[in-house]
Amino acid sequence: MWTGNVRAQSDTLSIGGLEVSSPYGEGYSENYAGVRDIWNADDSARVIPCYTLYNGFDTESIFDRTYNAKKDSTRLQLATNACDSHFPICGAINSPFGRRHGRMHYGLDIELDTGDPVVCAFEGMVRISRFHKQFGNVIVVRHANGLETLYGHLSELLVEPGDHVEAGDLIGLGGSTGRSTGAHLHFETRYLGQPIDPQLFFNVKEGELRASTLLVHPGLFTVIPSGNANSKGGGSYKVRRGDTLSSIARRQRTTVRALCSANRIGVRSKLRVGQRLRLK
């Protein structure tokens, strides 16, 4: 586990996590593969993915947004073989990347049940594995191309900072920890701290990469408002065990009356697990 002197950070309330800087210094005490030593930056650069690009390996702050990412373009190599990537969990998108109720939502909310296995999207090294008041149990993995992926609201963390993980490796179990109104995975993809829509990397429906490379350029960081990714003429919601009209209305930022009107049902109607409700 990587250790170092990191100044205390205060969490923000913006959806998408911390936007503060707290990199490690040039030299710090580390423990890697059971060998204790004092490493310098050159040693770290040989072991830690993109240590030089990020100027460190911070195991406390969720993200350090680097505005240099908005100035340059670079092509990221995502995969050379089919086994080089794996979508974290199969499920419908409850909430997409983009503006949501006047605030930014920097990732995808993917439907799951508590305890479902969540796997790593690409090979990399675990940078964050801890509890965060907004993301709950959260994992951040840094990859060799400079990309970082985040997995939030987990019920259990199965890896630690410094662990090497392969694409498809089990890293946690799905849940509803932190600021969450129901079990789901919050999945983010970022480059130098800047959020990129995960659907530019993955065809979520098929669970596959769209291409083996992605050109990262300043235009990717311009957010276009989007609607519900489950939408079929206005958006829909799949009823889960324990759901009520009031809990669904609260979670989807609507009203029981609106749900009843859109689905031509009464306030006392019985809901079935797996039933699709129109949201508009």
Image (tube, rainbow, N blue to C red):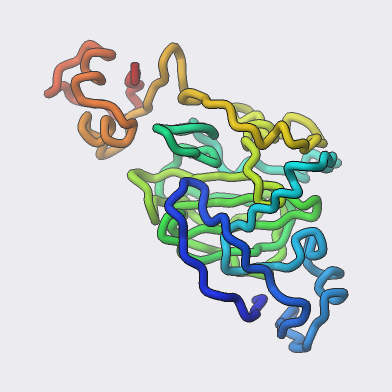
Q: In the image, is 236 to the left or to the right of 160?
A: left
Q: Toward the viewer: 30 or 17?
A: 17
Callout count: 0
Tell me if residue 1 comes above or below residue 221 in the rendering.
below
Where is residue 108 shown, x and y percent of the image? 53, 38
Residue at 57% from the left image edge and 75% from the top image edge: 7
Residue most extreme to the left: 268
Q: Residue at x 57, y 55 (%)?
A: 19
Q: Residue placed at 87% from the left, 74% from the top?
A: 42
Q: Is residue 1 above or below residue 274?
A: below
217 vs 257: above or below: below
Residue situated in front as seen by the camera: 147 or 137 = 147
Image x and y of residue 222, in percent: 64, 32
Q: Is residue 245 left or right of residue 24?
A: left
Image vertical order of residue 263 relative to residue 164, above or below: above
Specify whether 118 is left or right of 213.
left
Please identify the quadrant where the C terminus is shown.
Answer: top left
Query: Relative to residue 58, is residue 274 drawn left or right?
Result: left
Q: Position of residue 36 (x, y in %)?
A: 74, 88
Judge whether residue 253 can be spotted in this image: yes
Residue 115 visible in image? no
Q: At 63% across and 43% down in the image, what residue appears?
A: 195
Measured as percent of width and height from the top left, residue 82 is found at 79, 39
Quadrant (top left/top right/bottom left/bottom right) for the N terminus: bottom right
Q: Quarter of the image holding residue 252?
A: top left
Q: Nearer the viewer, residue 210 or 69?
A: 69
Q: Please identify the quarter of the rendering in which residue 34 is found.
A: bottom right
